Structure formats: C-alpha cells, structure tokens
Amino acid sequence: MGVLHWIQSVLVFTIVVETTKPNPACATQMRSIKLATMMERNSEELLRTYVSRQGFFQNSCTGQVEGIPEALIAGDKPEERLLSMYTTLRVLHRLFITVREQQKDLLESDDPLRNMLLDAQTRVTHLTGNLKIILTNVFPGVAIPPEHIPVPQPKISYFKKKLYGCRVLTKYNEFLSKVVQELTDIRKYVCTAVEIKLTAKINLRLRFHAFR
C-alpha cells in the first residue's frame, strides 16, 4: 500500500510539473505574434525608404508581377491557414534574395537600404521557422512541402529591377498586416489544442496506473 501511495504521489508531482511548465508551441505562437507585429511596423519604414531611394511614388508600386504572391491567406482550418502563411513566407524569402541581388546594381555597398533588406529577410526566416515549429507540434499530420530550388532570374533593366523590388515590398507589407491578425485570431486555438493533447496524455497515464 505504501509503494502504491508513493507511485501515485510521484505521478501527481509529474503531472503538476507538466501542466505548469511553459507550453513550447503556445510560447512560439506568442513570440510569432510579437515578431510579426514588429515586422509589419518595420516593413512600412522599409517600403518608404525604398520608394524614396529609388525615386518612385508609392502608388506606382501596385500591380501584380509574375512570381510575387498575392497578400492572401488561404484555407478554412487553422492548420491550413498556418500552412498558407508558411508557404507564402518561404516565397517571400526567395524574393528578398532576388531583390537584394538586384540592389547590388542599384545601390552602393554601404547604403543603409541594403542592410534594411537583409534584416527583413532574416526576420522572414525566423518567422517561417516559428510557423514550422507550430505546425509540426500542434498539427503533426500536416504535410509541409519541400523547399523549391531557386530558378535563375532573367536579366532585366535597371528600371524593372527598381519596380520589381518596390512591388515585392508592397506585397510584403500587405501580407504582414494579415499575418498579424491571423496569428492573433488562432492564438487561442493553438494554445488550447496543445493543452488538450497534454490533458489526454495525463488521463491516459492516470488510467494506466489505476489498473496496475
């Protein structure tokens, strides 16, 4: 009887520890909201700086260009919408690589805009990684598509390079505003889903020990 009581005490202690320790997926979700909010704010400054440096008016950066995704988040279920954000961010990451490469022909090596573009690309990488963590932990059944091999870009004029970058940054800014709202909307779902899985795990362990 003493041994059984000791086992139950240890089990209860383990459950308390598991239910009180930080939830990795939920914590990642919260960090992602903060990161996306900062990215949205910085994207506005980045776009204004780009437009000013390249001699454009901001309304000249509208319009669709092949290869630049629309600022949309597809899907009905949370996991579908997370995957949509993840996929678009991966595309934007590749586009930033292209824009930064094109800017080598347009800007001096010490131009602050080049560092701003690099910072934005780095944050896209971090946010993409966060979404992958959430998807794999909360929705392990979701198939994450493999990385695409970048396709070499054809040579274009200086003006088209300027316009391309301007439109990429415009879509980037529009998309981030939707990402911030979307991550905020599904925050409760992600955190609750993980808590439900943890509760089921604890209940299973309790039943296992009850029958021993």
Image (tube, rainbow, N blue to C red):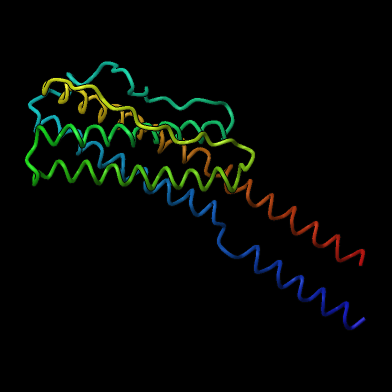
Query: Dividing the image into 4 quarters, which one contains the C terminus?
Result: bottom right
Seen in the picture, residue 73 relative to 197 is either above or below; the reply is: above
| Left or right: where 176 falls relative to 76 | left
Seen in the picture, residue 26 relative to 206 is either above or below; the reply is: above
| Left or right: where 189 falls relative to 126 | right
How many numbered marks appear? 0
Expressed as whole percent of the image width and height from the top left, the position of residue 156 reads 17, 20
Q: Which quadrant would residue 118 be assigned to in this image?
A: top left
Residue at image point 33% right, 27% down: 151
Expressed as whole percent of the image width and height from the top left, the position of residue 123 reads 33, 46
Seen in the picture, residue 49 relative to 110 is either above or below; the reply is: above
Query: Dividing the image into 4 quarters, which one contains the N terminus?
Result: bottom right
Expressed as whole percent of the image width and height from the top left, the position of residue 11 reads 77, 71
Residue at image point 76% right, 75% down: 10
Q: Which quadrant would residue 103 be assigned to in this image?
A: top left
| Left or right: where 116 falls relative to 140 | left
Residue at image point 9% right, 37% down: 107
Q: Which quadrant would residue 127 be assigned to in this image?
A: top left
